[in-house]
Image (cartoon, grey):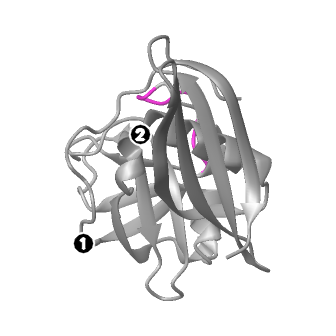
């Protein structure tokens, strides 16, 4: 299960970058990773990148299979020595979620650092809650909707997540209310919303 251990986040501006052309391989993972984050993290939507990669442990990447248009968001949990910077080593389950049979071995992909939510602490927290709350669905996109201050000691942030299963696409809205001085959550909520 998710621990509250702080993972370092990629701090550069990664707002709406173009996709990078690359390749994806797959692995069943292992017991120990260089990042200290288990391969099972986030319903196995995990990946390893090159040690020379600009992407960091705990950062999320959006991966797209250009052959069928399927997209996933994976968390970097490991580093691979000597791997090309544009090769992403996906957990087998993530590889299959892109619509590929592991017997293929290697596929062409497009990837980019996740949307701006990567820099939003509470949006990432809600993303993890949504991933656990909707087994069988993969988060393909997310956006920050609003940030308000209903009281001097309260901040409310709202995010919207797009989830995809083999049968349907749904949208889920997540809301978190917290005290900005103490960083303690007062309440949070997730609910399906109509498209």
Q: Residue at x 38, y 35 (%)?
A: 57
Image quadrant holding the N terminus, namely top right
Q: Earlier in the sequence, mark 2 or mark 1?
A: 1
Q: Residue at x 61, y 36 (%)?
A: 176
Label 2 crowd (10 A; few <14 / some 14-19 / many >=20): few
- Indicate the position of residue 150 as horizontal and vertical percent values: 54, 33
Q: Nearer the viewer, residue 117 or 31?
A: 117
Residue 152, percent from left and from top:
47, 21
| Circle nearer the viewer, 2 or 1 | 2
Which contiguous range is marked in magenta?
28-35
- The one nearer the camera, 52 or 145, is 145
Q: Position of residue 15 (x, y in %)?
A: 27, 58
As for residue 33 lying within the magenta part, the answer is yes
Q: Residue at x 67, y 76 (%)?
A: 195
Left or right of 86 on screen, residue 64: right
Q: Is residue 83 above or below residue 81?
A: below
Please, what secondary structure does the residue beneath circle 1 have? loop
Query: From this viewpoint, which residue is outermost toward the top?
Result: 182
Q: Which residue is mark 2?
A: 120
Rendering quarter of residue 134? bottom right
- Residue 56 seen in the current view: yes
Q: Which mark is residue 18?
A: 1
Give the SS element for disc 2. Answer: loop
Q: Residue 162 location in percent, x, y? A: 61, 66
Q: CA distance from mark 2 to mark 1?
A: 20 Å
Residue 82 located within the stretch drawn in magenta: no
Give the number of the disc on residue 130: none
Residue occupying image coordinates x 51% and y 58%: 73
């Amino acid at each position: 299960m998710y621990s509250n251990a702080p993972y370092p986040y990629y701090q550069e501006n990664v707002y709406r970058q173009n996709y990078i052309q690359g390749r994806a391989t797959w692995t069943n993972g292992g017991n120990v990773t260089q990042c200290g984050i288990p391969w099972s993290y986030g319903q196995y939507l995990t990946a390893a990148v090159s040690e020379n990669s600009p992407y960091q442990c705990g950062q999320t990447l959006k991966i797209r299979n250009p052959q069928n248009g399927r997209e996933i968001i994976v968390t970097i949990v490991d580093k691979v020595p000597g791997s090309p910077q544009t090769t992403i080593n996906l957990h087998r389950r993530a590889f299959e979620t892109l619509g590929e049979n592991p017997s293929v071995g290697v596929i062409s992909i497009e990837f980019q650092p996740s949307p701006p939510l990567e820099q939003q602490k509470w949006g990432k927290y809600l993303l993890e809650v949504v991933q656990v709350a909707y087994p069988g669905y993969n988060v393909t996109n997310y956006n920050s909707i609003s940030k308000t201050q209903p009281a001097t000691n309260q901040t409310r942030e709202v995010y919207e997540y797009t989830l995809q299963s083999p049968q349907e696409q749904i949208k889920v809205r997540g809301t978190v209310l917290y005290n900005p001085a103490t960083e303690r959550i007062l309440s949070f909520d997730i609910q399906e919303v109509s498209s």
